[in-house]
């Protein structure tokens, strides 16, 4: 009996120490392994590669269990961060409503909205995917302006949302490449619900 308790305690410590391992042990990991270190979102088929340009994936997991939101997080040198979120849609998708809590958090911490628009990206099926974007400026330091850009689009019954934190003009090309990689071909990479 003591031996079983010791094993269970050790297993509990190992699971608590590594959230990804915990998700796998509990059967709740929303991703499977793919080629070249990629993680495949089981429910949608969306692939989170190990690298997107200069970004390396450093985390995957469940963002909001009630909404069914899962995420892949990336980082690059120079403090550039990106996140991809996938949420199954129930009804229509309104990016402003879906991202409202993120907008509120930016505004509470001093972020100033500097841009909002829809952009068109090739959806991978010969049509343009409309992607909502909103950018907040969070700080300025010498010649660098720090931004957080939120994006969102409905793709085959899924909300595909991206967030990137970057310094402009230093990281403009990285930020654009990251967001292009999220949405380019998304319709052919996400299975319809």
Image (tube, grey):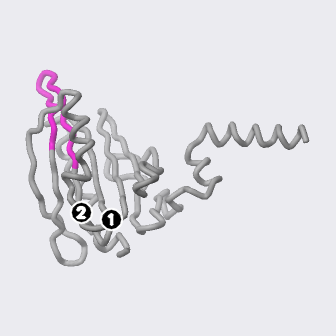
Where 37 sits versus 108, above or below?
Answer: below
Q: Is 84 part of what is drawn in magenta?
A: no
How far is mark 1 from mark 2, CA to CA?
7 Å
Left or right side of 163 for 126: left
The image quadrant that residue 69 belongs to is: bottom left
Q: Is 139 part of what is drawn in magenta?
A: yes
Q: Nearer the viewer, residue 183 or 114?
A: 114
Residue in the picture at 56% in, 48% down:
20
Where 88 sits versus 175, above or below?
Answer: below
The image shows residue 116 at horizontal and vertical percentages of: 10, 48
The magenta region covers 135-150
| Labelled disc at residue 104 | none
User: Which residue is disc 1 drawn over?
Assistant: 89
Left or right side of 1 for 76: left
Q: Quadrant of the N terminus?
A: top right
For disc 1, the neighbor class at 10 Å (few under 14, some 14 to 19, many from 20) is some
The image shows residue 139 at horizontal and vertical percentages of: 17, 27
Left or right side of 124 for 37: right
| Labelled disc at residue 93 | 2
Q: Nearer the viewer, residue 95 or 172?
A: 95
Numbered disc total: 2
Q: Nearer the viewer, residue 74 or 190?
A: 190
Q: Secondary structure at mark 1?
A: loop
Q: Quadrant of the C terminus?
A: bottom left
Majority secondary structure in the magenta region: strand
Q: Are marks 1 and 2 in contact (CB under 8 Å)?
A: yes
The image shows residue 132 at horizontal and vertical percentages of: 16, 56
Residue in the picture at 20% in, 59% down:
94
């Amino acid at each position: 009996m003591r031996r079983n308790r010791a094993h269970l305690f050790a297993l509990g410590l190992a699971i608590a120490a590594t959230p990804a391992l915990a998700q796998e042990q509990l059967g709740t990991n929303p991703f499977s392994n793919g080629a070249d270190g990629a993680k495949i979102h089981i429910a949608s088929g969306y692939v989170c590669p190990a690298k997107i340009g200069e970004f390396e994936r450093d985390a995957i997991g469940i963002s909001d269990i009630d909404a069914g939101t899962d995420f892949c997080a990336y980082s690059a040198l120079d403090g550039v961060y990106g996140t991809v979120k996938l949420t199954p849609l129930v009804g229509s998708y309104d990016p402003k409503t879906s991202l409202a809590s993120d907008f509120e958090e930016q505004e509470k911490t001093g972020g100033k909205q500097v841009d909002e628009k829809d952009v068109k990206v090739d959806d991978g099926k010969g049509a343009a995917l409309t992607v909502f974007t909103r950018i907040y400026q969070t700080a300025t330091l010498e010649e660098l302006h720090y931004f957080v850009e939120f994006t969102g689009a409905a793709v085959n019954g899924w909300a595909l949302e991206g967030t990137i934190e970057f310094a402009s003009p230093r990281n403009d090309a990285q930020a654009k490449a990251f967001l292009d990689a999220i949405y380019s071909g998304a319709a052919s990479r996400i299975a319809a619900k």
